[in-house]
């Protein structure tokens, strides 16, 4: 098994005021295998977004190590192989979807000719093909989520990290995103996504990681976890683990 992400004994704390600090992630270890879809579940405030930002090098860590593709998380080589969809994205409202993707593609090192086709192709994939020249300020919530996913997959990264990719989407939108993620998996990509949509996560994920208050309570293949507790649905399993 090839490992794309390896986290050992991670501790992350935010400043808590008056020189104090608030520990948000503690003694957290996790491995993500190449070519699989892994879900990160946990109640509001569990630390999912903090964990994702730590992996991306957006937050300093107090203890432990995070390796991407066998290299320290901050190496630019490792970062260029990543695609990231943030939980909240505020794109320049005065730009069009095409212009936004042009900026992200250029930052990812894509050239003009490559970008021209790739932007069209990616917008079609996320269901925004007619919206290339539409201003982002006129986008509905669901359209913004689709654009947010588009910028994450535009440069065809090997490892996708998505913070709540199903939030704000209508049922058809969820199916679209599910199909995109399945396609990415079939292409051999690795996906790590946080979600509150347990039924979506159950449909698409191979592995699950359940967090509460900065700690991982359970991780492993979904079927194995459910079997251990004699549960048939992820929702029931989740409630059991979180409340026990
Ligand atoms: N910038 C910050 N400064 C101080 N505390 C923070 C900061 N960001 C997050 N926290 C705290 O860290 C904890 C974890 O927050 P985080 O956003 O990682 O949770 P989450 O699991 O992503 O929640 P949600 O499901 O609501 O998105 C919470 O207690 C939150 O208040
Ligand atoms: Mg979050």
Image: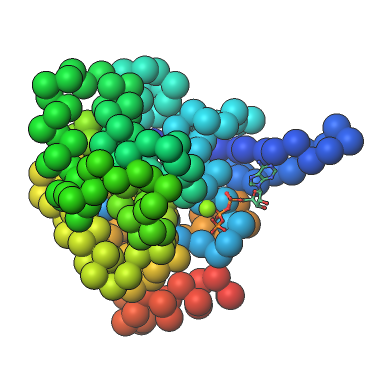
Against 197, is 15 above or below? above
Residue 198 visible, this angle: yes
In screen coordinates, is 38 left or right of 155?
A: right
Q: Quadrant of residue 156?
A: top left
Residue occupying image coordinates x 39% and y 68%: 197
In front of the other: 19 or 25: 19
In screen coordinates, is 52 left or right of 110?
A: right
In front of the other: 171 or 195: 171
Q: How many marks?
A: 0
Residue occupying image coordinates x 12% and y 24%: 114
Against 239, is 154 above or below? above
Q: Where is residue 73 in the image (x, y as percent from the top left)?
A: 42, 26
Q: Which of the image's four quarters has the N terminus?
A: top left
Residue occupying image coordinates x 64% and y 30%: 62
Residue occupying image coordinates x 62% and y 38%: 12
Q: Which of the image's four quarters has the C terminus?
A: bottom right
């Amino acid at each position: 098994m090839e490992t794309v992400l390896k986290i050992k004994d991670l501790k992350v704390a935010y400043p808590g005021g008056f020189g104090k600090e608030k520990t948000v992630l503690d003694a957290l270890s996790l491995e993500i295998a190449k070519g699989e879809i892994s879900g990160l579940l946990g109640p509001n405030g569990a630390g999912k977004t903090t964990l994702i930002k730590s992996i991306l090098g957006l937050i300093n860590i107090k203890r432990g190590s995070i390796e991407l593709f066998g290299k320290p998380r901050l190496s630019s080589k490792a970062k260029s192989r990543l695609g990231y969809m943030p939980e909240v994205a505020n794109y320049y409202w005065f730009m069009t979807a095409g212009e936004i993707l042009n900026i992200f593609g250029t930052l990812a090192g894509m050239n003009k000719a490559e970008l021209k086709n790739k932007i069209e192709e990616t917008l079609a994939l996320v269901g925004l093909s007619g919206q290339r020249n539409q201003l982002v300020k006129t986008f509905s919530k669901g359209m913004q989520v689709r654009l947010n996913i588009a910028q994450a997959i535009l440069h065809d990264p090997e490892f996708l990290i998505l913070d709540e990719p199903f939030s704000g989407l209508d049922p058809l939108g969820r199916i679209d995103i599910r199909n995109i993620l399945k396609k990415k998996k079939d292409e051999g990509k690795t996906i790590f996504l946080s979600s509150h949509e347990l039924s979506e996560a159950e449909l698409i994920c191979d592995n699950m990681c359940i967090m509460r208050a900065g700690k991982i309570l359970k991780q492993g293949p979904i079927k194995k976890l459910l079997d251990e507790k004699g549960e048939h649905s992820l929702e029931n399993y989740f409630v059991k683990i979180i409340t026990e």
